[in-house]
Image (tube, rainbow, N blue to C red):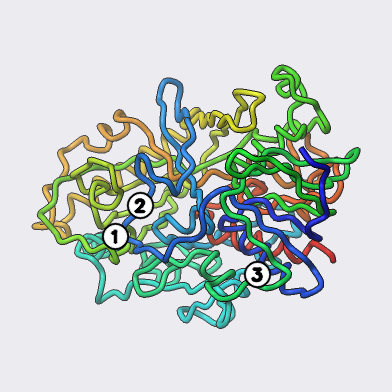
Amino acid sequence: MPAPATVADVIVVGGGSAGCVVAARLSENPYCTVVLVEAGPPAPAPGPVGTLPVGPGSELVWSYSAELEPGIPATLARGRVLGGSGAVNGGYFVRGTAADFERWPASWSYRAVLPYFRRLETDPVGERRWHGDDGPMPVTRTPAADLHPVSRAFVAAATSAGFGYQADLNEPDAVGVGPVPRNAASGLRVSTADAYLGAGPARPNLRVHTGTTARRLLFAGTRVVGVEVEEQGRGWALHADRVVVCCGAVATPHLLMHSGIGPAQELSELGLDVLVDRQGVGRGFTDHPEVTVGYRRRPLPHRSTTPLLEAVLEAELDTGPVELRPYTATFGEAIPGVSDPLGRLGVALMRPDSRGEVVLRSADPSAAPLVRYRYLRTAADRAGLRAGLDLAERLLRSDEFAGLLDPPEPGAAAAAMRAGVGTSMHLSGSCRMGSGAHPGDVVDERCRVLGVQGLWLADTSVMPELTSRGPHATAVMIAERVAGFIEM
């Protein structure tokens, strides 16, 4: 491999939901040269939010082997395209709540992060003190009059059951049932590649390399000096004094460990050199376990521009917070290559106790890691999910759904629980933020990797606690803030 050549002031590794933001914000300074490295292809044209191109064989996703519970295998799909998972998902763009950020370091309080949430968006709904008017990401919701019949029945059933209606689920402490804020416009998802990088001429100080995979980070002592990359089987080195890793909560710890940053014993057993012993790399992540209640419904037309999820219920039950998700289409209609004819109401546990790990299986950096979730390991998690499923069964059997679907049989909640848990694919916290005093801390409160110089992380891997909402909007906020931490 040739010696590293200086190519930029900053290399951003991973052009997903966070990496596009970091690269765009840093390159606003015309004196800062930025290289963005993305393994996937260029961003496709914005796709409809009612179709998710993440099914078997999709060329737009990474597929990771996962174990949800012992003996329950699964496949975890993450976006492999410029724009990342935000370019292939259903457009859910709900912020973490103020209470969520109370569980983060004080410098990441809701008051501290609110300016960045406002900066990233254009959202005409709700009180102006909570929302931005001229940010890159459009945030939209389905008007009540345009809701899909399933969504309309669900909102009516939830309000009849005593849950309040919440028009703006992105308010600081929003609970209740209401329309889902989406990173979408005119029925098409808008990824950060679309919103921040755009389709116009690139800035002369920003170069984007797609189809280029980062294999390991390069160091001189404990200072990062570049990135080893591969394109079409050819490897070379890129050099910069600052590197920001934005590969997501699976690929970021994978890259760190192959670069010698991680649990020393695990790295040594695989024959990898240890640069910094950081026990928290790949350890202690969380995700939202989800179980769905399936039902037969009368035939309804499926339009690709109808969001798969238009409304949700954020419910604070005695057992903890759950989110109920009435999907407007069958998964067979929404995901190419999937065969599933049932309507489904998803129930997700939003503050689980269970923790998982991302584990290397080989010293070869091209070998994907194993993702072990260890879902539902505590009695509290099992009780919380079961309470949410009981609520879902009651709502589906309510008068508001009469004529739209065949009511589930009594005991449907228990049957769904026995059928096995799924995942929301909201994996977060695999390289957690902290002061450095805890052995599981990986980055400091400015998201600098502890024990090395010139290296930042900016994606959901740094989240010290999983938000009780999906993490996409919070990931974009993190990227906005980390870009501001990098002094040029």
Q: Quadrant of the N terminus?
A: top right
Question: Which residue is rendered at x = 79% and y = 47% of the image?
Answer: 226
Foreground mark, 2 or 1, reads: 2
Helix, strand or loop status at disc 2:
strand
Label 2: few (<14), some (14–19) or many (≥20) C-alpha neighbours in 10 Å: many
Q: Horizontal and vertical percent for residue 364?
A: 64, 27
Question: Which residue is rendered at x = 34% and y = 53% of the image?
Answer: 325
Label 1: few (<14), some (14–19) or many (≥20) C-alpha neighbours in 10 Å: many
Amino acid, disc 3:
Tyr
| Vertical comparison of 366 with 40: above or below | above
Question: Which residue is rendered at x = 35% and y = 62% of the image?
Answer: 49
Residue tagged 1: 158
Residue tagged 2: 324
CA gap, disc 2 and disc 1: 10 Å
Residue tagged 3: 116
- Of 415 and 456, nearer the camera is 456
